[in-house]
Amino acid sequence: MGLEKLSKERREVLEKIARLEREGKFDEAVEEDPPAPELSPEKADYLCERFSNRCKRRIANFIADRYFLNLIKKDVLVIDGVTGEEHLSALSDGAIVTSNHFSAYDNYIVFHCIRKHLPRKYLYKIIREGNYTNFPGLYGFFFRHCNTLPLSSNRRTMMKFLSATNTLLKRGESILVYPEQEMWWNYRKPRPFKVGGFKMAYKAGVPVLPIFISMQDDETRLDEHGYPVQRHTVHILPPIYPDPSLGEKQGAEAMMLQAQKEYREKYEEVYGEPLAYGETAMK
């Protein structure tokens, strides 16, 4: 299926992705997001300690769950299957969950496929500051109240963020991290990782559970942008445990490199081609 009906906006995004890939700039944004207000410490309730936020969390999760389940029922959000479910036992005492980031929906794809194996009710998600402080409408409500952990450009807020993520992991919660950082729309290749999420796992003494989502074009349907509807398969990869004999820096880097290796191998297995970006390849 060609891209003759693709919208101008999405075509420009794909062109930008192709350019950034050639330039090796894998962590740059491809969407034109407006400037966002800074998240100050007093407005960040990471552990949902305020009663009003606990109420909003319950409402937001109830609405979001039904909203996305309806998309799945209508075959708008397509999940063809899950592999590697035997690895989900790594979630029993809390974990950092990683995923490739290609869609505003991919966090729910992950949650939907692992939810029965989460000992606690929720999957926490790390999100960018602007999605929390500056996103309108229903999705903005989800971004603020569906167990999200926003990053911040404020140093004091980030200290609060790091303390909260450590608390959540040590009490057995699981946190979804996008180690590629930015969302690249419908981009199928895993990109080089940032080490931050792996440092969280190492510090808290919990495993990293890598998840790679592969995509396939639906040959009969286009989405609202004129792009083929994507059919998703969720691959649960072997968990990676921290090596206590290493320091935090070396230990986190070792976990990150192992995760990148697992993503590369799964990509090459699924798509039947070497993982390469123009002139460079992930090591």
Image (cartoon, rainbow, N blue to C red):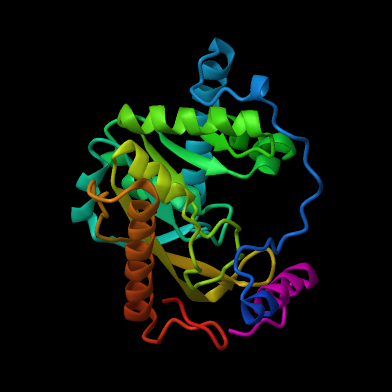
Q: Which residues are magenta?
A: 1-18
Residue 176 is left or right of residue 45, and the answer is left
Task: Say which residue appears at 36% left-offset and 39% top-offset.
Answer: 203
Membership of 132 in magenta stretch: no
> Percent x, y for residue 221?
56, 72
Q: Nearer the viewer, residue 237 or 167?
A: 167
Task: Say which residue appears at 32% left-offset and 52% top-offset.
Answer: 209
The quadrant the N terminus occupies is bottom right
Q: Nearer the viewer, residue 86 or 4?
A: 86
Q: Nearer the viewer, residue 142 or 147?
A: 147
Quarter location, residue 155:
top right
Membership of 12 in magenta stretch: yes
Q: In this view of the protein, can residue 146 be seen by the observer?
A: no
> Percent x, y for residue 246?
28, 51
Q: Residue furthest top?
A: 51
> Percent x, y for residue 223?
62, 66
Q: Main secondary structure of the magenta part?
A: helix
Is 81 situated above or below 282?
above
Q: In this view of the protein, can residue 86 be seen by the observer?
A: yes
> Percent x, y for residue 34?
81, 49
Q: Nearer the viewer, residue 277 or 84?
A: 277
Q: How many marks?
A: 0
Task: Say which residue appears at 72% left-offset and 77% top-offset.
Answer: 15
Residue 148 is left or right of residue 169, and the answer is right
Residue 88 is left or right of residue 179, and the answer is left
Is 1 situated above or below 56?
below
The quadrant the C terminus occupies is bottom left
